[in-house]
Image (tube, helix red, strand yellow):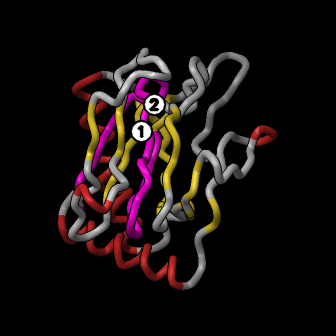
Amino acid sequence: MPDELTLALRNELLALDAAAELEAAGIGRQDDFTIDRQIRRTRITWFDGESAAQKAFLDWSDQLRIALNRELMLGLFEFEVCFAVYPPGGFYDRHLDSFAGARNRVISLVAYLTEDWHAEKGGALALWPAGAGDTDTPSDRVIPEAGGVVLMLSEDIPHAVEVTHEKRLGLAGWWRVNQSGVDRIDPIS
């Protein structure tokens, strides 16, 4: 991401965090939603698209969506995104970002906002190849360096945020495809 955008988003997230505007993140959706501190320890707040930094990020990510659709013919349609703060000791166990076959999330985006990060601070994004078993070791680890962006297939790429030793700042977003059909309209929410 551009440095100026990374800085603006970092400053907004730090202000939101200082004002206690973030909530404990859970797992699951709707009736299956729960907060389980054994699986995930992070605080989030969803974008409302109102601030200049959020608008700039949404414009930047929409250009990325257009390029992905043009080059890979993915049909990406709707985007949801949240800020995330992992406090010291924070983590998120291995998971997928979409339930298989649900197509509610197709491409996941992770962007890093923390300054001066290095491996000793923890908080790496651990990645496994599609189909990897529960006991397999990660195939890669991404250090959360400011401005870095990771894209992955939401249904296929297992990943985890390893325990962080310092406050880790970032955001996560997901693109969906339009699932409208004869019996169902899938509007942008």
Name the foreground residue: 156 vs 116: 116
- Classify mark 1: helix, strand or loop: strand
Name the foreground residue: 122 vs 71: 122
Q: Residue at x 27, y 73 (%)?
A: 7
Q: Identify the image quadrant of the N terminus.
A: bottom left
Residue picked out by circle 2: 154
- Under mark 1, the amino acid is Ser
Task: Give percent across and percent down for residue 17.
Answer: 51, 77
Per the model, the C-alpha gap separating discs 2 and 1 is 5 Å
Contact (Cβ within 8 Å) of mark 2 with mark 1: yes
Give left or right: position of 66 versus 153.
left
Image quadrant of residue 99? top right
Name the foreground residue: 23 vs 125: 125
Q: Residue at x 77, y 38 (%)?
A: 32
Q: Residue at x 35, y 70 (%)?
A: 9
Q: Is residue 163 above or below residue 174?
A: below
Give left or right: position of 119 versus 101.
left
* Outermost residue, right side: 31
Region in magenta: 146-174
Q: How many marks?
A: 2
Task: Give percent across and percent down for residue 170.
Answer: 39, 60
Let me know if residue 85 appears in the view: no
Q: Is residue 74 above or below residue 89?
A: above
Residue 86: in magenta span: no
Which mark sits nearer the N-terminus, 2 or 1?
A: 1
Tell me, for residue 108, which label it has, or none.
1
- Under mark 2, the amino acid is Ser
